[in-house]
Image (cartoon, rainbow, N blue to C red):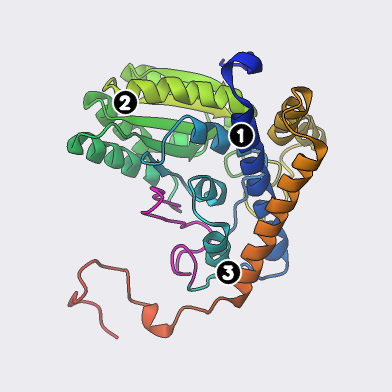
Amino acid sequence: MATKTDVKTKFTKETYLYWYELMLLLRRFEEKAGQLYGMQKIRGFCHLYIGQEAIAAGCMTATKPEDKFITAYRDHALAIAKGMSADACMAELYGKATGCSKGKGGSMHFFSLEHNFFGGHGIVGAQIGTGAGLAFAEKYKGTDNVAVVFFGDGAARQGMLHETFNMAMLWKLPVIFICENNMYAMGTSVERTSNVLDIYKLANAYDMPSDTIDGMSCEAVHEGMERAVKRARVGEGPTLLEIKTYRYRGHSMSDPAKYRTKEEVEEYKERDPLNVVLKTIQKNKWATDAEIEAITEKVKQQVEHCVEFAENSPWPSDDELLKDVYTQEDYPFIVD
């Protein structure tokens, strides 16, 4: 398993401050989304990323803006990490016209071509094949960009994964498959769903390089991603990374998470990546208490502003209903 390295030699002050501010924004955005869901400001499905922020942070510092990200329905944090504004994301949760998907996608369907974020998919495992398609496009165009495909431990049981792994290795596609293993899929532990408990070993059947990573550590995530990205950029093909993480909330807002103990949740909170990164910053005297407070206040203002933006944004107009279904504007089979 990849572990933390000497922070003094591997990562800079700027990297740690970036990680801390990004993870704090993701945490506060998700906490606010959960609160607003309880107030019925946000409807439908809503899956929060709280606890998994180190994956988003570590992946961002190991990739470049031109790299493509695609994920499933737990997509808010990765979207914001890729550069999508909290305003557009919160407005989408509200179903407002100013949302990143014009208010027509909701929580599970964030999307931004500008920021190379391709969803946001509600069908379990479907993004695995689509992500390989993004990688194929980059190889076809002759770029050195990579596609990063995120999926959960539950989606690792889908047939799509095996078909895609076979094709990705055959064509040496520049793709990194990331299993965000938070141990419980929707609510059933890995131990109860598979004879293979180490998901990274699924790559062995295709001679695909793989690794298992500590998903509570920004450092470990960055290092594992850095190795995989380097391979992909020089034409050596895909990598499977099983990043072991933990969500503090249930699978969705309707999940009371009674399938695990409170003690287990608290044990993982002791390794909270936000606190770990903050302690590293303080230990190395990379920021004063006043500077940390300034970051906290900046994030607070961002989250408050995105809620205000969503509240004051208009609803989509009725004539938006049939738009964006087909690229052909005069598609003849859409009728009123």
Tell me: 332 left or right of 151. left
Residue 257 placed where, x, y %?
71, 45
Against 158, residue 310 (above or below) is: below
Badge 3 or badge 2: first in the primary sequence: 3
Quadrant in which residue 323 is drawn: bottom left
Q: Quadrant of residue 217?
A: top right
Residue neighbourhood size for the residue with mark 3, other residues' Cα within 10 Å, grouped as few (<14), some (14–19), many (≥20) = many
Residue 154 - label: none
Count of labels in the image: 3
Residue hosting label 2: 233
Span colored in magenta: 98-121
Q: CA gap, disc 3 to disc 2?
A: 38 Å
Quadrant in which the C terminus is drawn:
bottom left
Point 25% across, 30% down: residue: 167
**Which callout, 1 or 2, points at the residue further toward the start of the chain?**
1
Residue labelled with disc 1: 54
In magenta stretch: residue 107: yes
Q: Measured from the top left, where is residue 335 in percent x and y?
A: 26, 83
